[in-house]
Image (cartoon, grey):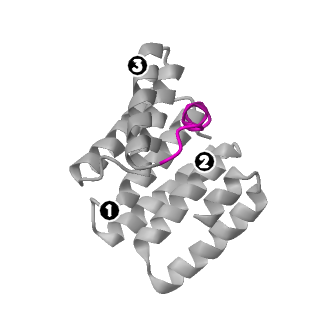
Amino acid sequence: DAANRMRWAGEDGRARELFAEAETLLRQVGMNAGLARVMCMRARESARAGNLDEGRRLLAEGREALARHGNPTHEFHAGCLMEEAVLERLAGDTSRSLALARQALALESAAGRGESELTATLLRSVARAHFDLGNYADAVQVVRDSMVVQERIGRDLGDNLWQSWNLL
C-alpha cells in the first residue's frame, strides 16, 4: 500500500524500493498471496516504464505465487488481473484489457465483494477500455456505476472521473 501511495505521489524511485523490500520480506516468510500482489504491482510499474517483457515476467511470477497460495477466490487474484489489464492496455491490446478487467469483476462478484474499492477501480478500468475502443456511451455508464460503488463504500467521488482516464 505504501509503495502504491508513493507511486501516485510521483515518488516512483521510492515506490520501487518499497516494492523490493516487500518482495524480500514476503519471500522470507512464505506469504504467497502478498508476494503475488507485489509481483503483479511491480509488473504494472514495469509496463508503465515501457518494459512490457519484464512486466509479463513479473506477472507470471505473481500467478505462480497465487497458485502456491491455493485460494482462487482470494482478492489478490482479481488485483493481479487488474494489473494485467493495465499492462495489456499499455501494450495496445485494449480488447484483452477489457476482458481481463471483466474477468476480475466477475471474480469479485462471485466472492461476494461486489462493492469494494477494488470493484470501483476495476469498473474504471472497464470504462477506460470502452473509451479507448470508442464505446463512449458505455464508458460513461460504467463510470457512473463506479461512482455508485464509491458512494456506497463511503469514498470521495471528486477524483473518480480523473482516475477513470488516468489508470497508469
Q: Which stretch appears magenta?
A: 155-166
**Tag 1's secondary structure?**
loop
Residue at the spot of label 1: 74
Q: Earlier in the sequence, mark 2 or mark 1?
A: 2
Within 10 Å of disc 1 (Cα), the crowding (few <14, some 14-19, many 20+) is some
Q: Which mark is residue 167?
A: none
Task: Name the quadrant containing residue 50.
Answer: top right
Q: Earlier in the sequence, mark 3 or mark 1?
A: 1
Distance between mark 2 and mark 1 Cα atoms: 26 Å
| Tag 3: amino acid | Asp
Q: Tell me the quarter of the image containing the C terminus.
A: top right
Q: Is residue 62 in view from this perspective?
A: yes
Task: Name the quadrant containing residue 63.
Answer: bottom left
**Tag 3's secondary structure?**
helix
Residue at the spot of label 3: 138
Residues under numbered marks 2 and 3 in contact, where contact means CB atoms less than 8 Å apart = no
| Tag 2: amino acid | Asp
Distance between mark 3 and mark 1 Cα atoms: 29 Å
Q: Nearer the viewer, residue 78 or 148?
A: 148
Is residue 163 highlighted in magenta? yes
Where residue 32 appears, as percent x and y from the top left, is 42, 73
Residues under numbered marks 2 and 1 in contact, where contact means CB atoms less than 8 Å apart = no
Residue at the spot of label 2: 53
| Residue drawn at x 67%, y 69% as measured from the top left | 18
Within 10 Å of disc 2 (Cα), the crowding (few <14, some 14-19, many 20+) is few
Q: Is residue 127 above or below residue 75?
A: above
Of badges 3 and 1, nearer the viewer stands 3
Total numbered labels placed on residues in the image: 3
Of badges 2 and 3, nearer the viewer stands 3
Q: Is residue 147 above or below residue 57?
A: above
Is residue 158 highlighted in magenta? yes
